[in-house]
Image (cartoon, rainbow, N blue to C red):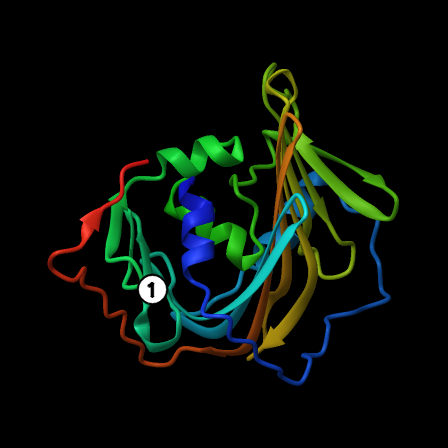
Amino acid sequence: MNKLKYIILTLALGLMFNCKSSKHVTGTDANLRLSTRQLIKENAKQVADFKTLQSKLKINYQEGNKSQTYSVNFRAEKDKAIWMSAAFSVVKVLITSEKVSFYNKLDNTYFEGDFTYLSNLLGTELDFQKVQNLLYGETIYSLKDNDYTSEVNDSLYVIQPKNQRELFEIFFLLDPVKFKVQSQQISQPKEFRHLQIDYLSYQNIDKQLLPENIKVIAVEANEELIVNLEFKNVSLNENLRFPFKIPSGFKEIQF
């Protein structure tokens, strides 16, 4: 079983929760006349500014005819750590700039390693910064106006490199009101690989725009993996702990 599937599946205890739905961020004052430089500048203004984030995270995993939904506690310290824990700490995950770690008390196993396998699975090179940007609604790759061009398509801004790589195509779709990312798409046509991250809704938390619903689609050949993430009860800038220690005697997983 691959690492991404293992992390998602072992986080499950079958617990579901219901919360009042958050207000979606909407607007009608679309501005479709910005230059690429102006657009990138407006997008940069919307980068969420916080130290820590805490949330209930619902994860829906779909592959073929299989679909499962789980709930976890999610904590993050910006630019430093991403932490998840299932109920009773049966499964914990800790992602830092150095490594990805998790353990599972249900079968006494653990993993510690880099981002290599996840990068291969999703078809693009990932590191901590890219994973963090994906979760916070920021472009995976840094936008610089001298490297990118933009156009309007179907009432959205489409940003792409001035010179697309021969084996690697990148597109970022921004909304014309808040200038937040609506979708980011990375393709390797010759490898039949496609990664698409859609931000279905945002929420306003302490004057910061953060994703509420994210849909991740990873396609390779005729295999498709879909992960839906829903952030609920989000709070910012609290004093958080990130307890993580692999229990002694656990067996290391090799991928």
Q: Quadrant of the N terminus?
A: top left
- Residue situated furthest left in the rendering: 248
Quarter-of-image position of residue 147:
top right
Q: For the C terminus, which image quadrant?
A: top left
Amino acid under label 1?
A: Val
Give above or below for 58 relative to 182.
Answer: below
Query: How far across and down, in percent of the image, does residue 254 sit?
Result: 27, 37
Residue 95 percent across, percent down from the top left: 33, 54
Label 1 neighbour load within 10 Å: few <14, some 14-19, many 20+: many
Task: Out of 155 and 243, give the one closest to the viewer.
Answer: 243
Residue at left offset 16%, top offset 62%: 247
**Residue position for label 1:** 91
In the image, what residue occupies the spot 31% across and 77% down?
240
Looking at the image, the residue that sits furthest to the bottom is 20
Q: Is residue 62 visible?
A: yes
Secondary structure under badge 1? strand
